[in-house]
Image (cartoon, coloured by chain):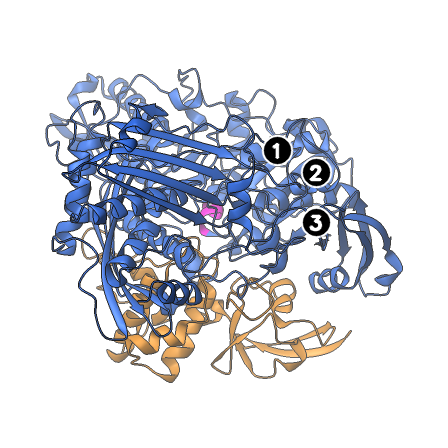
Amino acid sequence: MSEVTLRVNGERHSLDVEPSTPLLYVLRNDLGLRGPRFGCGLGQCGTCTVLMDGRAIRSCMRPVSRAEGEITTLEGLSAAGELDPVQQAWIDEQVPQCGYCQNGQILTAKALLDRNPDPSDEEIRQGMNGALCRCMTYYRVQSAVKRASEAIANGGGGADPNGAGGVNGAGAAAGEVDR
Amino acid sequence: MKRAAELSPRLDDALARWEGGTSRRDFLKTSGLFVLGFSSVGFSSVGFSSAGSGGGRGIGVAGLGPNGSGDPGETNSYPDPDYLQLDSWLVVHEDGSATFYVGKTDGGQGTGTAMRQMMCDELDLAYDRATLVMGRTDMTVDQGGSGGSDAIERDALPARRVAAEARRVLLELASERFDVPADELTVSEGVVSVAADPARAATYGDLIGGRRFDVALTGRNVNETTGLAPIKSVQELRVVGRSLPRYDIPAKVDGSLEWAVDVQLPGMVHARNVRPPFAGARLASVDESSVRDIPGFIRVVREGNYVAVVCEREEQAIRAAESLALEWEKSETAPFPSSEDLFEYMRGATPVGAGTGTSPRPRAEGDPDAALASAATVVEAGYDIPFQGHTAIGPAHAVADPSDGQMTVYTNDMKPYSHRTGIAEFLGMPPARVRVIWMEGPQLYGRTAADDAGFEAAYLARELGRPVRVQWMRHEETAWDTKGPAFAIDLRGGLDDAGNVVALDYRARIANYAHVGYNQADTVLIAQLMGIRPEQPSPGGGRGPDEMYHIPNRREETRAVRFPLAFETPLRTGNLRDPNGPQTTFAGESFIDEMAAAANADPVEFRLRLLRGTTEDDATFRRARSIAVVEAAAEAFGWDPRPSPRAPGSGRILTGRGISYAYRVQTAVATIAEVEVDRESGRVWVRRMVCAHDCGLVINPDGLENTIQGNLLHGISRTLYEEVQFDGERVTSVDWRTHPTITHRDAPEQIDVVIVNGDPNPDRPDLPHYGAGEPSHRTVPAAIANAIYDATGVRMRRIPLRPERVLEELAAAGA
């Protein structure tokens, strides 16, 4: 064991762990974060995705000693209490089914839109391709990426107060989904 | 230990209400809902502990109750909630809100949201004034959990009736309070008022908040549960039929939901399994010294061929499982053929067991042999469908807590009730001392390895005397999860001079001899590896395609074939979404297209002719609704009537369209796929899909659409990519490269879901709600194969259609 320092969702953590420990287990088991989840341990599915300095990385493959940048997990996207436009788009499009992989879908989309705020359909397919979903929600994921892209272009921060959508939001038509 | 504020909204809501103020356990205890006293172990773990009881219990205080209460008889037993008590299903709180308790689980298809909508409607309560708790064996009545797409079709009915009964009782209470007959009262969103004097009003909270109804229900089983009140007619429903947002989605999107995979208990340790490297291998020896120096190492657990390592930390357990030195002895007999030889093996093997189809159609009608002998044209074709895996995105997992002589298992298993009784039997514990708490997890499309992981966690927790969390690795999940069975299906059809189908002979061989049911103490993987055996292997069997075609002479036979290895096999089969539907409908609906082509007929028109051949035997309107969905799909697609294949294209990309139709139970579906075939790369892209779907009364249109979209894409994945591969000694599909799945790149550009909903029978008074979790899935493989035929003129009879196979088939046909 040795002391490792991490910056996660704006906070610094010093931990006494084996430096080769994959970042995933430290985030989940030491810091109690629930966004990144184990999917394959092989970097093939994206379920464990986190952002490191804004880039999507696979926390199942990254030794904690090499997690040197600012780490953002799914929880960190809305740390200020307001949903990120990507998260809001996921609610508005009612994307998830089981939802286990959606951490990877959302963070992959976040990284994609940060470097390319207005991706074409083809760029969305390519950019999202490494994020697997076994409920096969790809169709709605792609719609949500487009919706988030539009929200960002319109200067959208978080939730659109006039939008339908969230369970707690006042929908356009009596709380119903308007997709 | 988590703070109450960190609990997922659903659990937080459900539990906080009981822990503060009126406690659920006192409430239920005094209400006599349980045969025995209600357990106060209740919520004392997983972050429930701090919700009101002032901290959790430590591990290592066996014999003491939670918080050291020292009352094992009272604290470690979990009697069954009584389905014949209204209070078991529904509670109205002092603020007029309500909590519903249902014995179902939700795999992400919005079952919970739909049930809440239905119960709110019957209770006359606004949707956002209710919450719903699912699948906790100590808290929700046993409705079996999920399976068979029956939550909405079957299990919602008792829930609706109970909510209607609660409304009736609330009206009675208001009637007494205002001294006005109940029929002179009106109800709106949880407020009862006197119709003639609306100022005289009371909320549900005023009338009964925090107190029990104490109303007995009747019914010989949970499905029959009813009170005195009738449920509403379709015309009276207000909450049902609306696309209300799913309540579970926000917490899945912001990371706040606590999943089964997140459960952490004080003193919890981590386990990983070590599987046999060869199917049927026997464990000769284990060298524990190979892992003893790994930091955090606690123990190697071995029983028969079952091996697990337990460490303090998760990554330590993974490392120990990878490092453990073992000696295995290979079986002398090959356990199974290779996946390349599979279909030849299946066709040549002598079938076992009676293996009858369970299709409602008689197994033989007319004289198919004579009709084939005298037919103008005979069409013959064989179809091959491989083993396919559940391969959940999150490998199987569970956490088990063995403290105080009880066992609590946290799992995403879709059938928590049989999980509980199976684990109790396996461990030799009274079921009342075992509790299963369902929490959200990766997909639950049937008999997944979640069953196996829960048994493993419980066994290891008992062995260790500490809470144990186990999760399978990717290679285990892909290789050892239960499989959807392979099929080899041969068909012969006869056409007369006019192109009418006069005979159909369907003969299927299904490789599900090692079929395992749900949560069986003698077939879960750990039991098999320990050498526990049921008296007989599964007899196997399966069902044929479900369609309403009128064909005067037909025969249908489905029989199982076996491999040498029936137990401890990674090719064990178990229900995978619509267990036989995609396979049999692939054969059946591809073959209908082959006959349409032989008759030079348009595939839609050909099907409609077969459906319209008779009007008999249509009491449930199944045939009429089948006709309606075929017509609706064709119309929505813009189907241009002509025979397939189309005139051959000359470019690199060939396009075509194909239709497939089926019903499942009472749900009728027709799906049209439009494909692009790249004849240089062999890649098939399903560019557009149209699905016409009739599942009766729709509870939540957007939720239904999401469910159908998932079914369709899952179908594309199984048609184009998925195949479990194996050599003569082991499964070689171990990750996403060796068992590929559909990706973003492969998703259709356009999906049109057409909700048909009961046409063409407008006079039907109340169309019930049928299932939608699986029916559309089965139509996909044939729709794609038929579209490829339309595009290329080449018939694809073996799935999956990965590029290399498509290229081979195109080359063989000279296309």
- Dot 2 amino acid type: Ala
Query: Dot 2 corresponds to which residue?
Result: B527
Q: Are marks 2 and 1 in contact (CB under 8 Å)?
A: yes
Q: Which residues are magenta?
A: B9-13
Q: Nearer the viewer, residue A123 or B618?
A: B618
- Place of residue A26 in the rendered image (x, y in percent of width and height, measured from the top left): 64, 68
Q: Do dots 1 and 3 share one subunit?
A: yes
Amino acid type at image mark 1: Gln
Residue at (23%, 61%) from the top-left corner?
Answer: B656
Check disc 3 and give the amino acid type: Val
Q: Earlier in the sequence, mark 2 or mark 3?
A: 3
**Chain identifier matching the orange colour in the rendered picture:** A
Q: Which residue corresponds to mark 3?
A: B468
Residue under disc 2 on the same chain as residue under disc 3: yes
What separation in Å lies between label 2 and label 1 (alpha carbons)?
9 Å
Label number found at residue B353: none
Above or below — where is B437 with respect to B424?
Answer: below
Left or right position of B787 against B100: left
For label 1, the residue is B520
Q: Is residue B12 magenta?
A: yes
Query: In the rendered structure, does residue A168 fall within the stretch colored magenta?
Result: no
